Amino acid sequence: MSTICSSGASISANASAAADESIAPALAALGDRKADLAFIFASPKYDLEQVVQEAKARLEGVDIVATTTAGEITERGLTREGMGVLLVSAPDTRHLLNQAQPLGKNAKKLLKPLCSEADAQSGEHRARGRRHRSSIMFGDGLSPTFEQLVVEIRKHVPDDHLIVGAGAADEGALVKTVVGSNAGVAEGGVVVVHFWSPTPWATGMGHGLSQVSPRMTVTRASGNIVHEIDGRPAMDVYRDHAKSRGIDLESVPIGQYLIENELGVLLFEQIVRVRAPLRVLDDGSLSCAGEVPESAQVCIVRGAPHAILDAAREAAQQAKDALDGRAAAGILVFSCVCRGMTLGERYSGEVDAIRAVFPDVPIAGFSSYGEVARDPGRLDGYHNNTIVVVAIPE
């Protein structure tokens, strides 16, 4: 039997009503098919533990993966302070849910609990024709350990293993994020689902950003803290950049300026990853959403709204092309919170761009703190200010 997906959304004030309004229509759209897995994207205004319990009551026997968001995405558009759901019915696919657990500070210690059982099952699945393995992971987008975990899993699994996901968010408050599963929730946690399917899942990604400063060198950094760029406090470099554009950072919201003018890490002339500065430290250092290596070549990057929307369309087209002629049953979308801040009222255009490539296909996802995408064609893994489009084949 082919895979089918369905979606639902709600902006109700409480978790029980939101679960009713988002899950009921999604169940109805499945007809007589049973859901195998539910992705739930919920505003931090809800207690995620209650969200999971409400979902379990309505989805008996269905595995549940949940995360807090900075905005919820379906084919209906973007909601804030709401709930989005994608139900997946995939009789020919098997999955293994590693329940939500604290992320902690040591990514390597998480490899065994998150990957060993899946590794043991892979041989049997391949023997039964489910040759294609994928993993979806949601983790605390405020923790540098999440990026380190992506790197460790990327090194651990075979090159043909698709890894996608995103950083859990909290509506831009930058205080705490929560992920959940059937067994409960974990503040500052991580949850991973492994899939084995007869046909490969597909993904595309893009950012639409361009270089708006000279090439510079990170001269002092530790993890996700950039202390100095070209031998100067990192924030001083940003102040000069703003001044060159006629902007006094003392008179504008610094956080907004940083989000709209991020750090791009360069390989030759290509922007290979983007890092969002989240806050300014007392010594002028910048705390970023993701690691920036010392000695890295960087530049300040910025995206015009039309370029960001073009990147969304291109990411969707990449995913469609990777399906190699197969139809999509459903689409997962992970789009950095920075993109929504830049687009503002034009954000619906990002969803429209994806729908133009995948008309009449259920869509669900969320506005995130960091995005995960590693497929056989790319060796990278963790991103900021990026959109990731995942196509689940029929």
Image (cartoon, helix red, strand yellow):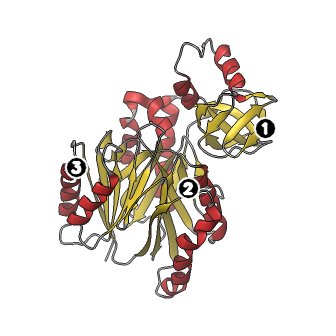
Query: Can you tell which of label 2 and label 1 is closer to the viewer?
Result: 1
Other residues around mark 1 within 10 Å, as few (<14) / some (14–19) / many (≥20):
many
- Relative image position of residue 85 (x, y in whole percent): 30, 55
The numbered mark, 2 or 3, whose residue comes first in the sequence reads 3
Amino acid type assigned to the residue bearing label 3 in the image: Ala
Quadrant for the C terminus, please.
bottom left
Which residue lies at the image location 51% right of the left edge and 59% below the top edge? 164
- Relative image position of residue 156 (x, y in whole percent): 64, 70
CA gap between label 3 and label 1 equals 47 Å
Q: Name the secondary structure under disc 3.
A: helix
* Residue closer to the observer: 359 or 185: 185
Other residues around mark 3 within 10 Å, as few (<14) / some (14–19) / many (≥20):
many
Amino acid type assigned to the residue bearing label 2 in the image: Ala
Query: Can you tell which of label 2 and label 3 is closer to the viewer?
Result: 3
Q: Mark 1 — residue?
A: 220
Other residues around mark 2 within 10 Å, as few (<14) / some (14–19) / many (≥20):
many
Which residue lies at the image location 37% right of the left edge and 78% below the top edge? 92
Please tell me the numbered disc located at residue 373.
Answer: 2
Q: Is residue 362 left or right of residue 172?
A: left
* Residue closer to the observer: 280 or 209: 280
The numbered mark, 3 or 1, whose residue comes first in the sequence reads 3
Asked whether residue 309 is in view, the answer is: no
